[in-house]
Every structure is written in C-alpha cells, then in structure tokens.
Image (cartoon, rainbow, N blue to C red):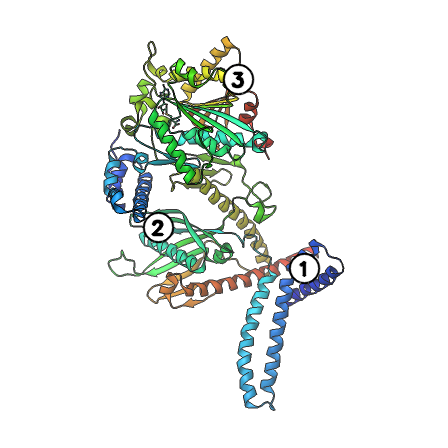
Amino acid sequence: MPRLPTSLIRKAYSYSPLLPLLLKATRDLALAKNELRWLQEHISSIHRLRKCTPKQYLPKPPTLSQLCRIRSTGEPLQYILGSQPFGDLEILCRKGILIPRPETEVYTTRLSNLLLRHGSIGNGNVESLQILDLCAGTGCIGLSLYAALHRQIPDVRVRAIDFNPQARNLAWKTVKLNQHLGRLSPSLSKSQFDYVLADLLNNEEIAAVVQSDATFNIVVSNPPYISIPAFSRDTSRSARIFEPSNALVPPDSVGITGERTGDLFYDHILRLSWRARPQIVCMEVADLEQALRVMRAVKDMEAIDGSLWEAKQIWRDEIDVQGNECSTEWNADVNAAIIGEGSGRAVVLARSWGVDVIKHDTAAFG
Amino acid sequence: MLERARVIAKDHAILSTELEANYSPKLAKKAGELSETANLLKAWEKAQESITALEGILVDKSSDRELKDLATEELSESKTVFQDAAMKLRASLLPKHPFAGLPCLLEVRPGAGGDEAAIFAGDLLRMYQAFCKRSGLRASLLKLDSSDGHGAEQVQEAILEVEGENAYDILRCEAGIHRVQRVPATEKQGRVHTSAVSVLVLPSFPENPTETLGTASFDNPESDYYIDPKDVRTDVMRARGAGGQHVNTTDSAVRLTHIPTNTVVAVQDGRSQHKNRAKAWQILRSRIAQARREAREEELAQMRLSVVGVAKMGRGDKIRTYNWGQARVTDHRSGITVHNLDDVMAGGENIDSIMQSVRAWMVERDLEALTADEQLEKKKSI
Ligand SMILES: C[S@@+](CC[C@H](N)C(=O)[O-])C[C@H]1O[C@@H](n2cnc3c(N)ncnc32)[C@H](O)[C@@H]1O
C-alpha cells in the first residue's frame, strides 16, 4: 500500500491532532473527519447514558484519543461503535461476525423497491411472502427486506440460515434493538424471523432445516465468495485481519484452484433454489467475472434439469435503487442483461411473477 | 394600487351577494381569497378617514387646546395604523409566492477572503441558528463542512433546514452576498479586511408534495419540482478497489448528478447511506426548482426593464454589510442601518428590524414589477 503523502498528514493534523490516526485507517481525509465526528457523538451518547444509570454499573467511558488509537490499528469503526445502519435498520456489529457492506445495501434496497413497485404487492393484494436468506450473518438482508415489505404484505416470513451461533444471537439482539427504535414491528417473533443454524455445504444438515417440500418466493444470499488469490490481493488489511475469514473465503475443496475457489457456494444455493422454486433468486458476487461464471453454471444446470429461469440479470454497483431504468447491455453468451455501472455485484434470476418484478420499468408504474 | 384594490373589493361584494343567493364551494373559495384585500382596504380607508377628520380638528380655529392636544396624539397613532394597513394592502395585492408557506434550506458558503470568509460564514450560520431559535423556527443542520476541528468555526459549506410556518417567506430576503469589514482574528498587522459570504435560500419540498403543492408534485412533469429519475446519476461510493466483501468501509457517501444541468449534490455526513440519499434528493430538488424559477424570473425581468426600468436584485449583488469598526449593519436594498451589531450577530431583535425592512422593500419591488407586467400586457393587446 502506498504511503500517505506528508502534506495530507499535516493537513489532517492541523484539523485535529487525532485526525492522522483515523487517516491511517481510512486513507481519505473527508472520511476521517466524518469518523472523528461519529466517534465524538458515540462518546457523548455514552456520557448521556451514564447520566441516567448509577455509575457503579457502567465501565468508565473511553476517551476520544483511546478510540482513535484503536481505530488506527485498522480495527473497523463498526466494531468500535457497535453497529452499522443498513436500509432503515440499525444492524449490530461484533467481532467475529461480518460487517454489512454498502454494496449489499444498494442491491437489497433495489430489490425491495422493485418488489413494492410490483402492482399486486404494492397494492397489498399479495397476502404472504416467504424469504430464504442463506449465509445470513447479521441478518441484515433478510431483516431489511422484512422491514420494507411488512408494511404492504401482512404475512412476511424470513428463514435465515448460517452456521455461526454467535451471528444468530446477534441477529436477535438486532431485532430487539430495532423494535425498541420503532423500526421493526413489535410483533416480529420466531414465526416471522426463523434463524436456524446449519452448514450450507452439508446436505444432511440442510435437508433437516429446509424440508424437501418447502417453497420460498425469494432466495437471497451473500455467501463467502473471495477466492484464495483474491484474499491476499484484493482485500483491505482491516477486513483481512479483523473480520472472520470463514465469512469471506469458502473452505478448500479438492481439485479447485485459482479464482474458482471463490465459487464454491453458488452450486449449493442454485440446487437448493431448484427445489424451493422461488420466483426470484438474488446472490451477491465479487465481480463481473464471477457473475458470468455463475451464469454459466446456471446454463449448465438448465441443460440437464430443464430451464427454470425466464429472466436473468447481473446488477452492478452503481445502479438505481428506486428500480428505475439504468444503462443496460445484453450478454448473449449467458442470456443475461447486465445493468448499471461499476463492478458486477449481484446475480438475479427470476421466473413467473418475479419476471415482472425485475423487469418493471417506469412506464408501467404509477 | 388603490384602483386595483377597489376593483377587488367590488368583485368581493358582488361575489358575497351571489353567495347568499346560491352557495357554491368554488365561489366561496374565491370570495375567501378576495376578502383579505377587501378587509384590508376597509381598514385602510377607515384610517385615512380618521386622519382627515383629525387634521380637520387641528386646522379648525374654534377647537380648544385640550381637544387639539388629544387630536395630535391620536393623529400620530392613526398614521402608524395607516402605514401598516397600506403595507399589508400592498402585500395582499401581490400573487402569493408559490413557495411562501414551505420550509426552506439556507445554504452558507464563504466567497472571496480565504480563512476570514470561512470564519464569517460560521458567524452567519450561528446568527441564523439563534434567529430561528428565538423565532420559534426549527433549524437542523443538513450538512456541515468545516475546515477546522474546533466545531463550526471555519465553515466551507453549511446547509440549514428550517421548518416552521412560512419559513421560506421569512428567510428568502437573506439570499445574496453578505459582506464583512473587520480586522480578522488571523490578521497580525491590525488591517481591516473585506470578505464576503454567499447565502442561498431555497424552498424545501416535503416528502409528499401533492398535499401542500396541489398539482405541482414530484410526479408532474410540468412542475418545477419534477425531476426525471433517468436524468439523475447516483454514485453510491467513490472508487475503492474491489468493494463488496473485500473492504469494510464506513463510507456511505451518496452523490447525485442531474445530467441536463450538471447539478451535483454530494452528501456524506451521516453513517446511513439511506439517509444520505434522502437528503441528497431533497437538496437536488430544491436547487433544480429554484434554478428553473430564477430562469423564468430573469426572462420576465428583462422584459420589464424594457418597459419601466425595474431592476431586479440578482444573486451576485451584495445585499448587506457588517462593519465591525463602526459596529453597524447596513442593508443595501432597503437602506436600513442598525447600530447594534452584537445583537444582530446574536440573532436578536435587530435582525428582525432589518429583515422586516427588506421584506417591505421586496413588496414594493414586486408591486412595481406587477404594474410593469400589466403595462406590458396592455401594450401587447394594443
Ligand atoms: C459474507 S457473510 C454475509 C453476511 C450477511 N448476509 C451480509 O450480507 O452481511 C457470509 C456468512 O456466511 C456464513 N457461512 C460461511 N460458511 C457457511 C456455511 N458453510 N454454512 C452456513 N453459513 C456459512 C458466515 O458465518 C457469514 O455469516
């Protein structure tokens, strides 16, 4: 990583002597200034809290310079502050569990807006919706879909699956927090948000938590997708050192090497989707190359099992979250529309009414 | 002006009798609109009558002293009432500014003058915050970009959202260049510097504008607030390598670019991408609507100029000077000068006096413009 220019460090120092510490972590002055302000706000909120709680029960609040020093080691700000906003929700973040990413937030928001724009969902004609969130982690995707859709659809159910019990505990704390903040309905309970522990790569475990006759309308997944070479090449130091690597990189698998080591989970998700017959599948990917590899895997499956998907899209990072038209190109090789600009980020498959949802354009709306 | 008011009052009288005979909600609404002018005209006429009567007593040789003293006293009172009525009457004749009732965004940016301008921008920001607090308006900072770590001392850009009844109408007189003359804190030789800060006041549009703005909603392509989503590019984050799982950034910056006008709005103050995006759209809508309105007004002003020479105060003109050495503030539009600088900067009552005098000045200008427009119409119809 290139060294930070001295002039930038000096500029940061003149703003605040603590800023160079944050600059070390963010490498961007504007962002460092923001982080300084967020840390200040965090500390004052702790002080406010102490005012109404007997002092002996609370640990001594940290000082700003302590927190800046911790941050300068690369420790993610979200772990220091304890949360990250995602859509309408405040998602709790703890060491050992992956922090929600802004890119994930973009396509999740787009997906929920597209669903709401769909005539029969937006008008409240749809009574129930079943969502399957694989590799759910903090639960950010499933929970924010729930929060957005629950207003229009009386019966939204989310089944979340992850193999990390700490992630499940944290997700439930997140539910409680957002109920307290009034952002999730107080009636949300285990029957609407069913977070179960299972290893997605273990067929028996999965069969036990997703019965063979279970159907879902929507399957979302942000599985570990970073390949072994990309882990040392493309990840930031902070993600590499401070976040759990089993949330980022799929486990070793015999006979697979190079970039393809990142693809392990998609086959499992696609096979599960074949069984559950969802109208929409939305999977996060690392880049356009991986998106195209996944699309080819879909094509191969269809050659054997018959075709299931009536529409296929690849969403890039810079894409309209309202669901409006964006620049689109067509890839004839995999029969998919590639939408937006920037890095490829999500593979989206649809059948039945899911096609209307993802192909919804502005003209048909209103 | 009087002629116009009398016509309206007559219309009102006719409408009222008609309404008594057969009521219709449409007529009632129209009558309601006219009644304000009609009532103000009555008040104005009454004040004028009493002035004539009192003056009669004063010139009458047969009146005794005591009566004359009483009349003098009452006369000055009547004159104030008269002036007040005249001002209100004038204002009522103007078509109501379409954004008058809306909340507003007040944007403060330093102009020429380096650090000193940025410091003064901070001073003005605090002045407006204090003014809002005292006037019962809710002010919240949508955006603050300061170049120092010690609070908002040196402001590069600040956007204040002001809510409350008629917030836009109250503050729109503040738009323009504010000039400061003083020895800056950073100046060692004790020389007086002149720097400038620009203030922009934009109406701010509610989430669901159909309620307050009628047909002029976001979805109506005819309205000023309409922005075709296809014309707006959204960059959710700056380029930062692979993104996704590879990087755990806290960067939730959202940048909107309105392609046809190349208007760029970037918001990154909050940790929530969702909220940054909502704020960015709010600011973009306000800027585009204001730009469209200004373009139209500019065109009108050119036409008026050709008829009667009514000039419009443009965005680029300096409107007010704050002079520290003489502890005074002068507004160059209404010509008012107040000598309590500290009170002005603290958002005290002296800023009210300035703003009131400017609003009265604006009413005069608008009326002149209206008369000019009518002349234009007449010319055209000949
Ligand atoms: C990239 S994180 C995604 C978390 C969350 N959905 C999000 O978008 O922020 C991947 C998640 O997959 C989980 N995971 C990894 N291997 C798994 C497996 N074999 N079975 C189930 N979950 C697994 C990890 O615990 C981690 O929470």
Residue A253, percent from left and from top = 33, 12
Chain ID, mark 3: A
Residue A330 horizontal/vertical position (percent): 51, 21
Report in which chain the residue with disc 1 lies.
Answer: B
Q: Position of residue A269 (x, y in %)?
A: 43, 18
Label 3: which residue? A309
Quadrant for the N terminus of chain B in the image:
bottom right
Q: Residues within 10 Å of mark 1 (few under 14, many from 20)?
A: many
Q: Chain of mark 2?
A: B
Q: Residue beneath label 1, please?
A: B31
- In the figure, is residue A118 to the left or right of A51? right
Would you say B127 lies left or right of B83 here?
left
Figure check: B34 above or below A74: below
Q: Residue at x 49, y 58 (%)?
A: B170
Residue B155: assigned label: 2
Residue type marked 1: Ala
Q: Position of residue B364 (x, y in %)?
A: 55, 63
